[in-house]
Amino acid sequence: MPLESAVNSLGFAKPVAETRVVVAMSGGVDSSVVAAQLAEEGYDVVGVTLQLYDHGAALAKKGACCAGRDIHDARRVAEEMGFPHYVLDYENTFREAVMDEFADSYLAGATPVPCIRCNERVKFKDLLETAKDLDADCMATGHYIQRMMGPMGAELHSAADPTKDQSYFLFSTTQEQLDFLRFPLGHLPSKEATRALAAKYGLSVADKPDSQDICFVPDGDYAAVIEKLRPGAAEPGDIVDVDGTILAQHRGVIHYTIGQRRGLGIGGLADPLYVVRLDVDAKQVIVGPKSMLATRRVPVREINWIGDGDLMDAGAREIAVRVRSTRPPIDATLRPISATEAEVELSVAEQGVSPGQACVFYDPESTRVLGGGWIWRGY
């Protein structure tokens, strides 16, 4: 191969030392390994960590990304590996772009996924623009997803390890963003392989536990966060059956999600009841049998399409979809209504499909992610 056409591991036809890559560092083991690996290979690495919410609260909180301890850990990794590291205050941006919508979505009876909005509106938008301002050739993250080159350009694919795959949370990545992004961990067979690399590089975070919670929701207590963001939001009301019969009282619609069975305070029934709908205006939690949770028709809007051609070009098409992050993709038919709206018909009924969740599209014949959209109402 002629020297001038050789490309480095990040896909650039230039020397490694002249290729600048901004690494989005959360302070966890994944992004730390990405930064360390690229630094060891000789790339011009710049680490950036986002402070996303109140620093005082962050310092007191453990077990969530982008908290005070994590900022310290990211800085320490940069010092260990010898590359510059910056902390950017994105608190106002994060609140406006992610936290406020999270609260308002819950108050409207939806079940939002703030991690997707954070990737879409903060990390892959504002931070990506910052990387370009730093004259970076690309931005790398520790997400478990693969970027592959196809005949039409860069494609998004599921991670090699299905148990760590984060494609559900990255469906809104645009083609322009994908051209600039790199995901060095997506091909690894397991999280153990990542930790082995962290140990190889001697990183202080090699044994750091994975974060489990949404970063601004301590201990998974969504209602407490919403009440703090929207004082007075937890207004009490009735728990009713599908015929409108009052069965019990609740302390606020924000405490319930579609498909919930526990914590309803309804006893003495032969068959368990589940939350099948939330009526925010009437302050009602509607419950019914499990069978009422099943649906095959899923309306989707705000679609981001990164498959070949335009969404409307081929009309209805057979795809695979994921309607929640914890379920594997299932066969479905995608019927476009416009460039950003469609109806998805599932081959098998799914239970608990909720407005506010994502519906992610996959090529049924490969690991390619075709995009996705937001579920916006039920039938």
Image: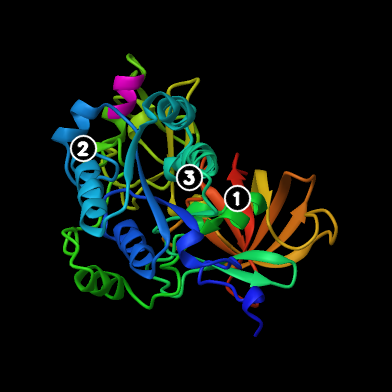
* Callout 2 amino acid: Gly
Query: What is the distance, in whole Å, between disc 3 and disc 2 at their CAs?
Result: 20 Å
Instruction: Give the residues in magenta.
Output: 225-229
Q: Which residue is mark 2?
A: 68
Q: Position of residue 95 (x, y in %)?
A: 41, 26
Query: What is the distance, in whole Å, between disc 3 and disc 1 at their CAs?
Result: 11 Å
Residue 119 - label: 3
Q: Position of residue 196 (x, y in %)?
A: 24, 74
Indicate left or right for 375 with 288 as reference.
right
Residue placed at 45% from the left, 69% from the top?
186
* Callout 3 amino acid: Asn
Q: How many marks?
A: 3
Mark 1 / mark 2, whichever is N-terminal: 2
Within 10 Å of disc 3 (Cα), the crowding (few <14, some 14-19, many 20+) is some
Q: Which residue is mark 1?
A: 177
228 in the magenta segment: yes
Residue placed at 58% from the left, 51% from the top?
173
